[in-house]
Amino acid sequence: MTDLAVFDHVTDDDIAPGALVKVMVESAQAESFWVQVTRKLADSGEWVGRVNNHLLCTDLHGLKVNDRLRFRACHVIRVDD
């Protein structure tokens, strides 16, 4: 799994399928990006989404636009209104 930064101001109640959320990957170069939420996994409590923008540091962390990503609310920097 990709190493995601941890925050504490977003909860599961703030996230829903269809929402855009911003997360940050921790690598040699930290990079934040948007993820389009697709669903919540009932068994693990994780959210699933797709990377929604082109990333600058793909060569460092391996993520690119349209990649599927699993994350938790604690990984979300903000939810787009």
Image (spheres, grey):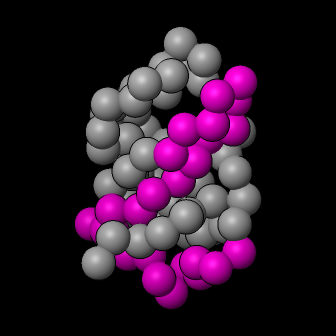
Q: Height in image: 3 above or below 45?
A: above
Question: Where in the figure is residue 33, as x and y percent of width and height?
Answer: 43, 45
Q: Is residue 18 magenta?
A: yes
| Left or right relative to 31: residue 7 | right
Magenta segment boundaries in residue numbering: 8-32
Query: Image quadrant for the N terminus?
Result: top right
Query: Image quadrant for the C terminus?
Result: bottom left
Which residue does the image show at 41% across and 62% down from the upper left?
21
Which residue does the image show at 43% across and 38% down from the upper left?
68
Q: Is residue 60 magenta?
A: no
Q: Height in image: 25 above or below 27?
A: below
Which residue does the image show at 72% across and 59% down from the upper left?
6
Question: Where in the figure is residue 45, as x and y percent of width and height?
Answer: 63, 68
Residue 36 visible in the displayed image: yes
Which residue does the image show at 60% across and 17% down from the upper left?
60
Looking at the picture, tell me which residue is in the foreground, 60 or 67.
Answer: 60
Dividing the picture into quadrants, the one containing residue 18 is bottom left
Dividing the picture into quadrants, the one containing residue 72 is bottom right
Residue 43 visible in the displayed image: no
| Left or right relative to 30: residue 23 | left
| Left or right relative to 10: residue 34 | left
Looking at the image, the residue that sits furthest to the bottom is 13
Looking at the picture, tell me which residue is in the foreground, 55 or 72.
Answer: 55
Question: Where in the figure is residue 67, as x and y percent of width and height?
Answer: 39, 32
Dividing the picture into quadrants, the one containing residue 54 is top left
Q: Height in image: 55 above or below 45?
A: above
